Amino acid sequence: MSDSVLYSVILLASLGMVAAVLLYVVSKKFYVFENPLIAEVDEILPSANCGGCGSPGCKAFAERLVNTEDISDLFCPVGGNEVMKQVAAILGKKVAEKDATVAVLRCQGGCDVRPKTTEYQGPRTCAISAMIYSGETDCQYGCLGDGDCVKVCKFDAMYMDEHTGLPVIITDKCTSCGACVEACPRDIIEMRPKHKRDLKIFVGCLNEDKAGIAKKACDVACIGCSKCQEICPKDAVLMANNLAYIDPIMCTLCRKCVEVCPTNSIIETNFPPKKVKKVEPEAEVNVESINLKTDA
Amino acid sequence: MLKTFPKGGIHPPENKITASKGIKKMTLPKVVYVPISQHIGIPAEITVGVKDKVDIGQVIAKSGGFMSSNIHSPVAGTVTKLDKIIDTSGYKKQCIVIRTDLKDESNFKDTEYPLKTTITLEPKDILQKINDSGIVGLGGATFPSHVKLSIKEGTKLDHLIINGVECEPYLTADHRLMLEKAEEIIVGIKILMFALHIDNAIIGIENNKADAIETFKKIIRKDDPIKIAALKVKYPQGGEKQLVRALLNREVPKNGLPLDVGVIVHNVGTIFAIYQAIQHNIPLIERVVTVTGKKLENPSNYWVKIGTPITDLVNEVGGLPEGTRKIVNGGPMMGKAIKNMDVPVTKGTSGILVISEDEASRGEPKNCIRCGECVDVCPMGLEPHLLMNLSEKGMYEKASAEDIMTCIECGSCSYVCPSHRPLLDYIRFGKNSVKKMNTSKN
């Protein structure tokens, strides 16, 4: 009885020994040298594997950082300057400092301001409807509202607004990885500098049609009137194809263009409310009362 | 046994309600919108300016390259605008807007010319004339005809196939054309045979058009090298590859053309356009369009000027019936719903189908039950369910390896799917993405 126990213990122990020796030999023989810096850099990177840097994942990006001589044009949008500084410290290389960016939606054409003129039946993805036709409204530049951008966002930074049918970007969660920019078949989403306190001014429209057609398709369309360009003290507004574009670098956030825009297509975000009283509140009350009447 | 292609295919209800309606001349439209891109390839270049007077048949946009086509003014009138108008693609495209001069008598001149059988032009001149006349494939693909006819020296061609299949339900444009212009079509075939030095021609017609088959049989003499073949009714027999397989039992290679097996295929409409161009010097400015739909007051076939807005066509047949849900440019299988009524008729418009509420519903897509129906009916021997999944998941490399590009987009898979899955929508998307992927690689 005790013999069989002894034998099995000896057998297993010797098997273990053989295996250990084998593994040791193999690991020495086929050892692959990996730069320890890669693991170190990988540790610092945010491990989001979003692909915003252009590499397929954080590990691949770490390898690229370690193996590339000049890393000044490599950047991790999720980690930002802070992470890149740490990487620079480890690798002893120079990194470029970039302004933090955030995704903005350059379309305000919600259901309330952009009437639907056709109805689409078929798979609800932006990519397919963009391939088939110009969308349910008369604007062929604006948001299709099927939410391809929301589906690709890995950071829960986007959701579809039920009332307007447009995606909303939660600025605090947005890491500017650029997945939504790539997913949008209409190129509506743009990465813009965050500035201090996330102040932004941009034209929320991409409609290149002539004024009349654009306005008919959407109440808040840019009609290319150039008023913003005329008033801009810094020449930050570029006009092309009946459309204004505000250069984020030239813009000093003076908000003059926002006031003159006749169609309210210039968007300002996170600014404190203006102290000057406007006549608008009255108009709003009127609209409400009309709505109430129709409801009743 | 009637001939047909062996793999797949379906037989949807034919609904050829306009089969007995002769082709009428459409009332002259007041304004025509002529898109400069009515063919596959490079858009034509506009050669007229605003306020220019144009004559009927005058070139208003010149071919933009080899893979392009001339565009002629369908009416006599004045160019009022060069504007962007939504066309059949669903997007705004450059158009030449011409206000018709209703007093100009050339607009009313009857296009019926006496039959002219003697061919006076040399083969080279015939091909040049086809190029100049802006003729494209009128079956729906709008492939420039002169490109199809530019055959490299040394290519062996033994058969010219004339596609009179018209397998799409509802459409009867080709059917009526064959009945009314049979002799002209025969001359057209002879012109092409002469120009390309081909010895044999076969006209393929589905058996539901018995009267057209009879008409041709009466005209063709025994010593003529032109044959008529009656085919079993099956969709999509009008596809080039399916037709070649059905008539000659030859398999066109996967990514090849009928040319690779010594065959050239042309639609009857194209043949008639070639006849008009060569014998009467009339460029492609009008075509037969079937305006149909179950609820329409007076559906019929019309000679329609290119550029006529669809509103005019619908008014011609008695206006939009109540409860209209969709207007489709083309047949119910391959056609595409249009975005608004101002979309103009182009060289590729073979029919306008008005669909009511109860017919238009697509059904709620459910999960795939793996029944294999789509695989059974695919005439190209593909696996539509697999291709859809691959496209949906963005696996374009795999989709490409599964031959997604050979799909002819006939829609048989979507038609039979008991779960109403939007198979073709996704496959088309996949094809587009594969195309993009391939161009970015190169």
Image (cartoon, grey):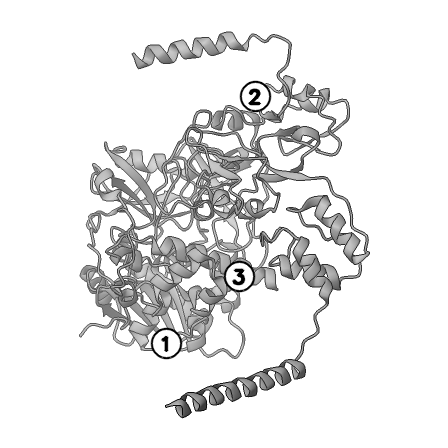
- In the rendered structure, which amino acid carries the disc numbered 3? Gln
Image coords of residue B281 (percent x, y): 46, 53
Quarter that holds the C terminus of chain B: bottom right
Which residue position holds label 1?
Answer: B251
Q: Is residue B412 above or below residue B21?
A: below
Q: Mark 1 and mark 3: span between their CA atoms?
A: 31 Å
Q: Mark 2 and mark 3: span between their CA atoms?
A: 54 Å
Q: Quadrant of residue B419?
A: bottom left
Classify mark 1: residues with Cα within 10 Å, few (<14), some (14-19) or many (20+): some
- Foreground residue among B102 and A291: A291
- Foreground residue among A81 and B69: A81
Q: Is residue A89 above or below residue B95?
A: below
Image side of residue A124 versus residue A32, left or right: left
Comparing labels 2 and 1, the label whose residue is closer to the camera: 2
Q: Which mark is residue A263?
A: 2
Q: Mark 2 and mark 1: span between their CA atoms?
A: 60 Å
Image side of residue B132 versus residue A98, left or right: left
Q: Quadrant of residue B174?
A: bottom left
Same chain under badges 1 and 3? The reply is yes
Res. B126 in view: no
Q: Which mark is residue B128?
A: 3
Circle 3: element type: helix
- Foreground residue among B46 and B224: B46
- In the rendered structure, which amino acid carries the disc numbered 2? Thr
